[in-house]
Amino acid sequence: MSENKNGMRVGKPLASRRSFVRGAGLALAGAAAFGLAGCAQGSENAGRSTAANQGSDVSWDEEYDVVVVGAGIAGITAAITVAEEGEGASCLLLEKDAAPNGNSPFCAGWQLYIDDVDGAVVYLNELIGESTPEDVIEAFAVELKENRTWLLGLGAQEDWLEPYPPDPTGKSTKEYPEMPNDNTMGFILFKTEGDQPYYHINDFLLDVLNDRSDIVTYKKSTPMESLIQDPFTKAIVGVEAGGKSYRAKRGVIMCTGGFENDPEMLRDYTGVRGYPYAGKGNTGDGHRACMKVGADFWHMHGGAQYWLSLRDLENTKFVSTLFSFTSKQHGITVGVNGRRFYQDFDACSNYSKYAAPDSDLSLNVGYRHGITQFGGNWTHLPLPEKAWFVFDQAGLDAGAMPAEVSKDPVAEGWALKADTIEELAAATEMPPDELVKTVGQWNEFVERGEDLAFYRPADTLTPIATSPYYAMLCVPALLNTDGGPVRSAKGEILDPMGEPIEGLFSAGEFGSVWGHLYQGAGNVGECGAFGRISARSALARSESA
């Protein structure tokens, strides 16, 4: 694992794999009718009959008390919990790639924790709204309180951590200072500098996992192909993975993350063809497996998405993968029609300078994990697949393209250049009259000191008036999706009638509790909270037949 020049932790991305998910009593033809048969079976699985996935006549290759699918922070937490609290219960942890390749190794590593459960519940109910039941929010809050002490109990040292505790003495400005009890939120962050053994929570937990290898069997490069369901009770009794059948005597915990690397799912559930910042492993395979066993789904529109991020002209790489990066204060963003169409001072999170206690959230600007104010509400925008960031020579000199990324953005394929706005429009295939009109109106707003179209902050109003002029490609970017199977307060995956699917649980971003607005560090926070909740729920079950 290394860091790129923007400070993001990077590993070698692996090609995404979408394998057809067999089993759960569905025949191949039936699955094809639901549009799920577009992915090929591995040759080593070709001889297995569909009936073998119904659980009644499976020849088990191995058996464990608990099987955890996905080795991100949620899956590792669940596996460690089985090891720590299972009184000898065995655990299998499956990872589809040679190393975890979802969001966990790439995220900032901040983990949410709280001290005041009652106060946090008030805040979380206000933030999440009616999209997640209150009993789920309460269970989440109760376990959030344990996140910090749990890490310390595993051997983390106080001097490895940056102190970002909840602030009971006053109003914080950590995410939504406009809301009651925002000061109840705290964060755990491993120091990123200095002399300590760990710089990221993921690295620490992996080492703890390795120390529990006598109880937890960790299999990499072993993608799950299907859940195995008892045909009579409909309980989940195991999984097929890597061509083998693994019995789960007490339960399967799904921790397979989101679907940000599946373009079709992004289009169908969010309406946008987006480009993810992090790893390539989250392709929605866990979602398909749970669809086949009858899970209900929620929050499929949710996640840290979308904002228009700068890419090279070939659309192969981002200018920056820092989630708070923006240089949009040095120009404007326009669509392929040459018109501005939204409040275009955007990054995943750029709100902190403009958020203030007791202010009116319906009038505020800036992105908060990809969600922005639109018509007085905070929501995800249906952004176009392609747009252009337009600026002038003065904007370039001021940092529209960071010098550390490129000192010659035109020669290095980052930007187009023209002597006039009309020529720039021709180079980008935008209507010249529309772009000229848009730039003229923008310069009038700048002179007036007020963006009357989209209310950008006054300190981001910079003219486009000094030749030559530049345009850079923008595409919709996202960190993660949050949608997936509906989760109970016990971490159970529910069917459309609200009943638990016996033996099936979830944690992390796979069916996240975050259904509307999102609190920073919240996904890693629920990886810890529901990783433990779901593991304990699985351990509490009797062995399957």
Image (cartoon, grey):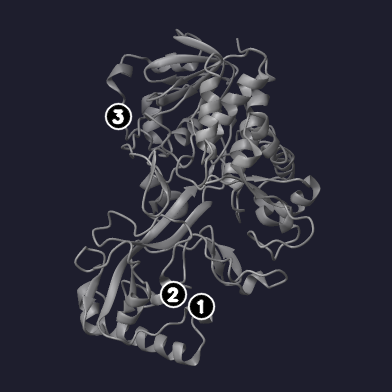
Residue tagged 1? 456
Instruction: Tell me residue 42's x, y (percent).
Output: 30, 23
Which label was assigned to residue 90? none
With 287 as the anchor, is 66 left or right in this view? Answer: right
Badge 3: few (under 14), some or many (20 or more) residues near its Cα, within 10 Å?
A: few
Instruction: Tell me residue 102's x, y (percent).
Output: 44, 39
Instruction: Tell me residue 439's x, y (percent).
Output: 35, 84
Residue tagged 3? 40
Q: Amino acid at mark 3?
A: Ala
Residue 20 in the image: above or below residue 1? above
Residue tagged 2? 329
- Can residue 338 be seen at all in this image of the molecule? no
With 200 as the anchor, is 182 left or right in this view? Answer: right
Instruction: Tell me residue 198's x, y (percent).
Output: 52, 37
Q: Nearer the viewer, residue 123 or 356?
A: 356
Instruction: Name the element at disc 3.
Output: loop
Badge 1: few (under 14), some or many (20 or more) residues near its Cα, within 10 Å?
A: many
Instruction: Name the element at disc 1.
Output: loop
**Separation (CA) of disc 3 from disc 2:** 47 Å
With 249 as the anchor, is 441 left or right in this view? Answer: left
Query: On the rendered image, what quadrant is the N terminus found in?
Result: top left
